[in-house]
Amino acid sequence: METNRLEAFSDGVIAIIITIMVLELKVPSGAGFANLQPILPIFLSYVLSFIYVGIYWNNHHHLLHAARRVSAGVLWANLHWLFWLSLFPVATAWIGTNRLAPAPTAAYGGILLMAAIAYFVLQRAIVANEGPDSILATALGSDWKGKLSPLLYIAAIPLAFVDPRVSAALYVSVALLWLIPDRRIERALAKRESLT
């Protein structure tokens, strides 16, 4: 099977996830800027989650463009990853509504961790399907950001019960780490196109 159907399905699910997250934002009760204060934590959690979903969407796009075909294993790995992404709206609303309380902050990190693991599994499934000498296998290389991110999540989860602000800072740090575009796959695809 070609990758375009999988990419279209994933794009649709991601669009729904973002829509559900934005629906959690409520209109302020008054017309003054002071009326924004109560919804600020919910808005900030939305912004962070939107950035995470955007980063995943961007990287998923590049990941599938490096693949030539998908297998049943890739389809299931993609569904596994989408499952964890689908929990972002609940975690986003919970952490925002409860203003970085320890349990919601830890749960948010747990979902971020599981999404990162699921994305790693998806990458490995595509590499296994494409072969060890594939463009994707070469492009991924050591993937230091992919290895560092889960470690930061693992540290942030228990830290949520010590100081949730430290956990939030780690979640923001990982997002900032990934905001810097990862050009490995783009470079590998450009190289493939120049050879053909």
Image: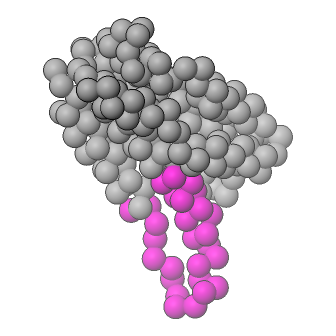
70 lies left or right of 155: left
Q: Is residue 98 visible?
A: yes
6 lies left or right of 152: left
Residue at the spot 39% in from the left edge and 30% down from the top edge: 191
| The quarter of the displayed image where residue 151 is located | top right
187 lies left or right of 167: left
The colouring scheme, among rainbow, by chain, secondary structure or one colour, is: one colour
Give the residue furthest to the bottom.
31
> Quick one: 78 or 144, which is closer to the camera?
144
Residue 173 in picture, x, y percent from top left: 69, 46
Residue 10 in picture, x, y percent from top left: 29, 38
**Which residues are the magenta region?**
23-51
Residue 29 in picture, x, y percent from top left: 51, 82
Is 65 a magenta residue? no
Q: Is residue 85 visible?
A: no
> Quick one: 102 or 46, which is closer to the camera?
46
| The quarter of the displayed image where residue 163 is located | top right
Q: Quadrant of the N terminus?
A: top left
Residue at the spot 37% in from the left edge and 35% down from the top edge: 190
Q: How many marks?
A: 0
| The quarter of the displayed image where residue 20 is located | bottom left
Residue 134 vs 178, above or below: the answer is above
Is 44 a magenta residue? yes
Residue 10 vs 22, above or below: the answer is above
Residue at the spot 63% in from the left edge and 55% down from the top edge: 98
Q: Quadrant of the C terminus?
A: top left
Residue at the spot 32% in from the left edge and 26% down from the top edge: 195
Instruction: Name the dominant secondary structure of the magenta segment.
Output: helix
